[in-house]
């Protein structure tokens, strides 16, 4: 990166990049495909739509609540735009729910903590984790032809915006923490702590989704579409490679997430070393 992280130039750069890459669209007028009965059954059988819808609504509400507390004008403008996009994500999910008759109702939003910036940061790290794992899951689902390609094209629009949000958030955090005097080791430690909180929330969401559907609607035949030939190594590779592919479209001077790709890279190196273990042992003998 040629721009010093945390500088005034860095702030202007990442905020303006975010503002300039905004795309206008209306979820109602997207080219939603007609689904046959089999595809409808698969879509309706996914057990997490209610949680996904709730999460997107909560995301928009958190960002909107935090925005007025930001004193810097261009940062406030960029975060306000993110709030608009998060609310649009919720509308997109709602349009899908209504159009395809998915059993998912609107749950009341929980009260936000008094520290709205911490809530925003919690949300940002959660979005980073969700998206990194989602990259791999999205690729698996698309390759399995779980739904028609036109449906994945719509969700690819959402995935691009999520990636924009991640890049903006990572740069926001670097600017915020550097301006507060945190050095690199402390920033890494803080990020790890927030990622841990995000992982616990993600596990909680999965458990709630399973409880709502009691596992009955997501039939074994549907699950097998994802799990046929599934391996942990391939999933990690997909997450890592898809993350790199999606990040490659952004200006190289923008900071990007490092921790999760770094962990994935380390895991893949370890798995490759494990695969070579018999050969290494034979050579040692």
Image (cartoon, grey):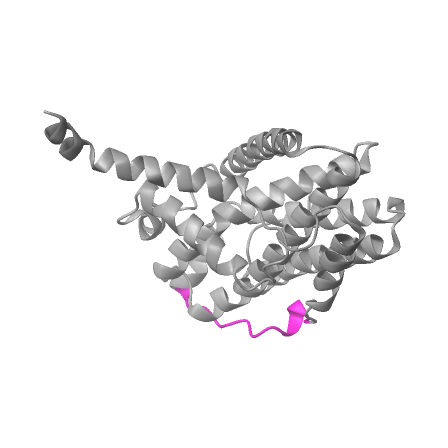
Q: For this rendering, which residue is in front, 225 or 257?
A: 257
Left or right of 198, for residue 211: left
Q: For this rendering, which residue is in front, 79 or 108?
A: 79
Image coordinates of residue 56 in percent, x first then y, are 66, 50
Residue 264, by quadrant, is top left
Does the image show residue 110? no
Q: For this rendering, which residue is in front, 111 or 37?
A: 111
Image coordinates of residue 120 in percent, x first then y, are 74, 41
Left or right of 120, for residue 2: left
Does the image show residue 114? yes
Does the magenta portion include 191? no
Does the magenta portion include 27? yes
The quadrant of the image that shows the C terminus is top left
User: Residue at point 61% right, 45% down?
Assistant: 127
User: Residue at point 74% right, 50% down?
Assistant: 60
Q: Which residues are magenta?
A: 25-37
Magenta-colored segment: predominant secondary structure: loop
Image coordinates of residue 99 in percent, x first then y, are 58, 65
Residue 40, by quadrant, is bottom left
Left or right of 278, for residue 43: right
Residue 273, by quadrant, is top left
Left or right of 69, for residue 106: left
Above or below 29: residue 67: above
Q: For this rendering, which residue is in front, 179 or 131?
A: 179
How many dots with numbers? 0
Image coordinates of residue 9 in percent, x first then y, are 77, 56
Above or below 118: residue 27: below
């Amino acid at each position: 990166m040629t721009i010093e992280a945390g500088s005034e130039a860095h702030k202007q750069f990442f905020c303006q990049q975010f503002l300039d890459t905004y795309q206008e669209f209306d979820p109602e007028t997207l080219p939603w495909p007609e689904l046959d009965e089999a595809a409808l059954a698969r879509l309706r059988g996914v057990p997490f739509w209610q949680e996904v819808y709730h999460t997107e609504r909560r995301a928009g509400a958190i960002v909107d609540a935090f925005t007025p507390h930001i004193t810097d004008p261009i940062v406030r403008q960029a975060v306000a735009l993110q709030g608009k996009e998060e609310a649009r994500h919720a509308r997109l999910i709602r349009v899908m729910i209504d159009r395809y008759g998915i059993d998912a109702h609107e749950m009341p939003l929980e009260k936000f903590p008094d520290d709205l910036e911490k809530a925003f940061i919690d949300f940002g790290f959660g979005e980073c984790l969700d998206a990194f794992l989602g990259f791999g899951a999205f690729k698996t689902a698309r390759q399995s032809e779980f739904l028609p390609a036109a449906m994945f094209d719509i969700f690819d629009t959402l995935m691009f915006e999520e990636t924009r949000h991640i890049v903006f958030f990572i740069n926001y955090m670097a600017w915020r923490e550097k301006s507060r005097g945190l050095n690199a080791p402390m920033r890494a430690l803080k990020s790890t702590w927030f990622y841990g909180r995000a992982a616990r929330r993600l596990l909680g969401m999965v458990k709630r989704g399973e409880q709502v559907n009691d596992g009955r609607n997501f039939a074994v035949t549907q699950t097998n579409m994802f799990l046929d030939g599934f391996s942990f190594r391939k999933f990690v590779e997909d997450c890592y490679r898809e993350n790199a592919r999606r990040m490659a479209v952004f200006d190289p001077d923008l900071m990007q997430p490092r921790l999760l790709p770094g962990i994935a890279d380390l895991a893949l190196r370890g798995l490759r070393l494990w695969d070579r273990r018999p050969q290494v042992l034979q050579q040692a003998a």
